[in-house]
Image (cartoon, rainbow, N blue to C red):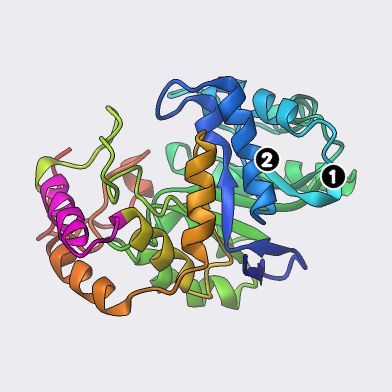
Amino acid sequence: MEYRELGKTGLKVSVVSFGASSLGQEFRQVDINEAMRAVHVAMDCGMNLIDTSPYYGRGMSEVLLGVALRGVPRDRYLLGTKLGRYDVAHFDFSAKRVVESIDVSLHRLGVDYLDYILCHDIEFVDMSQIVEETLPAIRKVQEQGKVRFVGVSGYPMKIFRFILDQTDLDVVLSYNHYTLQNTMLADLAPYLKEKGVGIMNAAPFSARLLTNAPLPPWHKAPESVRAICRKAAEYCQSRGVDIAQLALQFSIANPDMATCITGSANPDRVRQWAEWAEQPLDQQLVAEVQNILKPIHNWFYIEGRPENNDEPVPELPQEV
């Protein structure tokens, strides 16, 4: 497993990291024993960073992860979670909740400190609160040693510039924006690197859009987007390659992305990702697949408040 520097944090992170949203049953019902075994397989395969949130499974992910990590030396893994989003429509980024949330997460996870904490899905709120109240409150907790590094996460690219134009961050987490289909995060990378921010890319499969698996019922891609992605998957299959393999390899190939976070409660799937990460990327196949995906290149959906979203591209599908 390859490791890269995470911005200026001094942390060296595996190019593939374990996302624990699957432990919260965000995609399907899971077998608890299998799910917890997946955590250990990830670490055995060299994935040294684990990412979760109190939102995933409404606490279930953190609780199960805490059980899975019992007895594992704390220096064997890097651990990050989030705060501010607690249900589909429940957000609380107040300073009071910052303190409570971090303490609850530490208790659930069974650890004394977090390697990073992220403000989760900030596009759903007035982002000035994040700058003026939330981040200052987290920095106070950081001084107590409960948190090592601080960042934000969310879907639109616009949110990262908004925050970083006004204050400092150690890390950011972006999802669905550095994939075979959408490379908007690469366009933002020079700005983030100039700010000294560690870049964490998540969701190389775009919530199964770039796989052969059925999409979760909440997926926002319209049929026009789904059809083109199916065509790309079928083309890969005709070449004897799983599009998921190509998607993961593509997402970790860019050195600007310190790590790519993806998760599964299936230990065999996690082991397969580690194997794919060691295999060479077929650049010719990437070019051919991206040509198929060209009509929906950088397609994205609206998430959170309209004013916090990026400007839509007129020629791309907009329906949800």
Is residue 290 or residue 187 the one in the foreground? Answer: 290
Amino acid of disc 1: Arg
Tell me residue 81's x, y (percent): 65, 40
Dot 2 or dot 1, earlier in sequence: 2
Q: Residue 3 sits in which quadrant?
A: bottom right
Tell me residue 263's x, y (percent): 51, 42
Q: Does residue 59 appear left or right of residue 143 in this picture?
A: left
Q: For numbered disc 2, what is the local secondary structure? A: helix
Is residue 197 or residue 240 the one in the foreground? Answer: 240
Q: Is residue 233 magenta?
A: yes
Q: Quadrant of the C terminus?
A: top left
Q: Does residue 34 appear left or right of residue 102 in this picture?
A: left
Check whether the beta carbons of the residues at disc 2 and disc 1 lie within 8 A of each other: no
Q: For numbered disc 1, what is the local secondary structure? A: helix
Q: Residue sitting at 42 percent across and 59 percent down?
A: 248
Q: Does residue 12 appear anywhere in the picture?
A: yes
Camera-nearest label, 2 or 1: 2
Disc 1: which residue: 74
Q: Residue 169 sits in which quadrant?
A: bottom right
Q: Does residue 132 appear anywhere in the picture?
A: no
Residue reaching furthest to the right? 144
Q: CA distance from mark 2 to mark 1?
A: 13 Å
Amino acid of disc 2: His
Q: Residue sitting at 55 percent across and 40 percent down?
A: 120
What secondary structure characterizes most of the magenta part?
Answer: helix
Disc 2: which residue: 40
Tell me residue 185's x, y (percent): 42, 65
